[in-house]
Amino acid sequence: MMSDLGNKEIMAQNIQRLMDKRGIDRNKICTDLGFKYTTFTDWVKGNTYPRIDKIEMMANYFGVSKSELVEHYDENKPYYANPEIAQFAQALQSSPYANNLITSITDLSEEEMAETLKYIDFLKSKRNT
């Protein structure tokens, strides 16, 4: 049974919220994704629950995770549950240097990463002198 993924009402609310947010009506999404209008309407009204492949299609269409379709949406809930990760994500978003640094280190070997960390520690130690 699909109920462990979420309930029909939550799915219906989330589909409608995402459609409203993007200014998409039922006809457009049905045309774009090849859904039968009556079937899609049943999902939006909370009468039935889509199969997982259809949930995945909608998630990709809206550019969200499947969980954003099947789980209760709370606009006040922080995107990252861990405050340290939220702070890190904010730093990445607001600093082009931080973003470039993270992007640059993704290709480093373990040895290069260790050397980079040593250099960062060296720079920090100079700050305290």
Image (cartoon, rainbow, N blue to C red):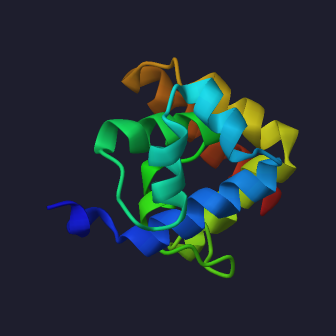
Above-or-below relation of 23 to 56: below
In this rendered view, identify the residue nearer to me: 25 or 58.
25
State the residue lying farthest toward the front: 38
Rendered image quadrant of residue 55: top left
Residue at the (78%, 63%) spot, across then down: 128
- Note whether residue 27 is visible: yes
Q: In the shown orientation, is residue 108 left or right of residue 62? A: left
Asked if residue 9 lies left or right of residue 29, the reply is left
Residue at the far left in the pictured view = 1
Residue 124, percent from left and from top: 71, 53
Residue 15, by quadrant, is bottom right
Q: Quadrant of the N terminus?
A: bottom left
Give the percent coordinates (x, y) of residue 35. 49, 33
Question: Does residue 126 show up?
Answer: no
Asked if residue 15 is positioned above or below residue 122 in the image, the reply reads: below
Residue 110 position in % (x across, y down): 38, 25
Image x and y of residue 52, in percent: 31, 44
Q: Quadrant of the C terminus?
A: bottom right
Residue shown at 52% from the left, 40% from the top: 58
Q: Is residue 19 found left or right of 30 in the rendered image?
A: right
Which residue appears at 73% of the width and 45% of the height? 123
